[in-house]
């Protein structure tokens, strides 16, 4: 499978040990595709068991979350925090609340987060947390009680210089507020242990827009360097009704693109003339979804109740911003047939390994989420800096820093990919550039 016999042995071991963790195995497989260019050139990787160490989290915390619903019934969920790697800084990564959450998903996310955080240039390690609890359909009071119960266990293991959680799927400003309030009460400390906080208690301007806006700054740089072009009049399709997809659409429209299709949990809407993005923004903010309500305003727009069919719509640029593995190889082929020449991840690994390989072999410029969606954690890092200095930067200051960070990430990925003879393979560039910094730190810190 790989040119390196060392990687082949290691990957077989990973598949045997973690056969029940498919998401984690996929993340490792995608990462090893890039390591195949590096490991034989760097014998210290094998000599000091860098990959063996980097594949195992430094710590996995698993706990029970017991809480009481509005009917007075006791509910029990599973909670986790995966502290994957702290070679270059404190663990940093979001918390995900969804019924689908399990250890495999959190390990894959924390593994990816390690290299994403490295790419930002900020001193942050990789971590991720969550619970198999879905806020959907729950009252504010139930969500508050669950968040407080979750943090009642988690607070022992986090801190501004230890582990700094943030939001993720199912965890927004409301949930962060409830968790931070309980953390502050239990720890008796008002410090920047969470990011994504409200502006009134230490949050950063521009944080909620950061992942979506950063994604488009990355896309703009790809167009500029690879095609000597801009976003003006480009046909864009975006999946996901959360803050990433919504803000990606807003920034895409602001930069002159034509967003022709967007999806949410109910399906997707398509209009070759371009969607009304201010309306999508408002509906998403008010309702958390937009497709069905959008049709009331634009009855001539096309609606399909299967979101996956959206990848067959004609476009220039596809931005998957929903969840992992939403684009498989058949979807990639449909995108190619529909004229798509750029697929840039807004979610965490929404493209399967087979689809990524297809893109790289068939002329679709591909950017992995560990690079292209790093805007969120980048501004979280900026929030940590503001908290540490007891300062508050303006929206313009944060946005300018975000744009520069995304340009720098693209440059690192492109330069590294070029060094290995694959200038358009940004997955290769992102994996190696992100890994090298962690690898160097691990060598210098010794075997621990």
Image (cartoon, helix red, strand yellow):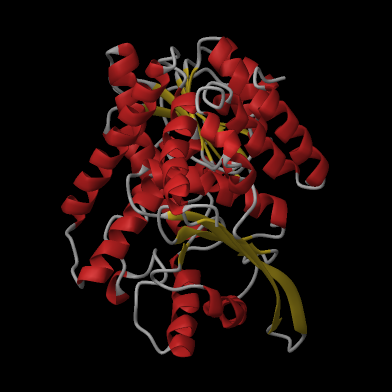
Can you give x and y, in whole percent of width and height, for residue 403 in the image? 25, 40
Q: Is residue 146 left or right of residue 319?
A: right
Q: Position of residue 128 (x, y in %)?
A: 56, 58
Quarter placement of the C terminus: bottom right
443 in relation to 314, above or below: below
Nearer the observer, 447 or 325: 447
Q: Position of residue 82 (x, y in %)?
A: 60, 60
From the top left corner, tell me how far across and down residue 162 is, in percent. Answer: 45, 68
Horizontal relation, residue 436 to residue 335: left or right: left
Q: Is residue 333 above or below residue 17?
A: above
Of the 4 image quadrants, the one containing the N terminus is top right
Residue 250 seen in this snapshot: no
Q: Quadrant of residue 189?
A: bottom left
Residue nearest the observer in this picture, 310 or 441: 441
In front: 90, or 110? Answer: 90
In the displayed structure image, the side of residue 289 where residue 421 appears, left or right = left
Q: Residue at x 54, y 51 (%)?
A: 289
Please say whether residue 70 is visible from this viewpoint: yes
The residue under the point 45% across, 18% down is 316
Q: Is residue 36 above or below residue 374?
A: above
Q: Nearer the viewer, residue 100 or 14?
A: 14
Q: Is residue 287 left or right of residue 77?
A: left
Q: Which residue is at 52% across, 25% downward?
A: 38
| Picture layout, residue 296 above or below residue 420 | below
Q: Quadrant of residue 437?
A: top left
């Amino acid at each position: 499978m790989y040119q390196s016999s060392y990687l082949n042995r290691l990957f077989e071991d990973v598949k045997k040990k973690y056969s029940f963790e498919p998401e984690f195995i996929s993340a490792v497989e995608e990462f090893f595709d890039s390591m195949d260019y590096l490991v034989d050139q760097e014998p210290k990787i094998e000599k000091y068991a860098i990959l063996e160490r980097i594949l195992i989290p430094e710590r996995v915390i698993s706990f029970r979350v017991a809480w009481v619903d509005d009917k007075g019934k006791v509910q029990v969920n599973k909670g986790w925090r995966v502290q994957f790697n702290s070679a270059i800084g404190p663990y940093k990564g979001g918390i995900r609340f969804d019924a689908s959450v399990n250890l495999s998903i959190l390990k894959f996310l924390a593994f990816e987060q390690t290299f994403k955080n490295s790419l930002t240039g900020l001193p942050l390690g990789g971590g991720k947390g969550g619970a198999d609890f879905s806020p959907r359909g729950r009252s504010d009071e139930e969500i508050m009680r669950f968040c407080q119960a979750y943090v009642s266990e988690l607070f022992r293991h986090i801190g501004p210089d230890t582990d700094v959680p943030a939001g993720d799927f199912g965890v927004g400003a409301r949930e962060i507020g409830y968790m931070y309030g309980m953390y502050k009460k239990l720890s008796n400390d008002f410090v920047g242990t969470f990011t994504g906080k409200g502006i009134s208690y230490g949050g950063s301007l521009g944080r909620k827009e950061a992942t979506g806006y950063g994604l488009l700054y990355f896309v703009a740089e790809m167009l500029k360097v690879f095609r000597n072009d801009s976003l003006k009049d480009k046909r864009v399709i975006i999946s996901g009704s959360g803050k990433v997809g919504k803000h990606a659409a807003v920034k895409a429209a602001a930069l002159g693109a034509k967003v022709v299709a967007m999806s949410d949990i109910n399906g997707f809407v398509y209009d070759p003339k371009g969607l009304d993005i201010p309306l999508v923004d408002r509906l998403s903010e008010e309702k958390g979804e937009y497709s069905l309500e959008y049709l009331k305003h634009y009855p001539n727009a096309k609606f399909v109740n299967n979101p996956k069919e959206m990848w067959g719509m004609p476009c220039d640029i596809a931005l998957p911003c929903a969840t992992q593995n939403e684009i498989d190889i058949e979807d990639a082929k449909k995108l190619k047939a529909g004229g798509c020449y750029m697929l840039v991840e807004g979610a965490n690994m929404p493209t399967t390994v087979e689809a990524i390989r297809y893109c790289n072999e068939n002329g679709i410029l591909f950017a992995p989420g560990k690079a292209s969606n790093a805007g969120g954690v980048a501004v979280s890092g900026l929030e940590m800096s503001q908290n540490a200095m007891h300062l508050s930067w303006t929206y313009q200051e944060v946005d300018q820093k975000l744009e520069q960070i995304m340009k720098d990430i693209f440059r690192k990925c492109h330069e590294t990919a070029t060094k290995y003879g694959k200038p358009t393979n940004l997955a290769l560039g992102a994996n190696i550039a992100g890994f090298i910094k962690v690898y160097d730190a691990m060598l210098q810190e010794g075997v621990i």
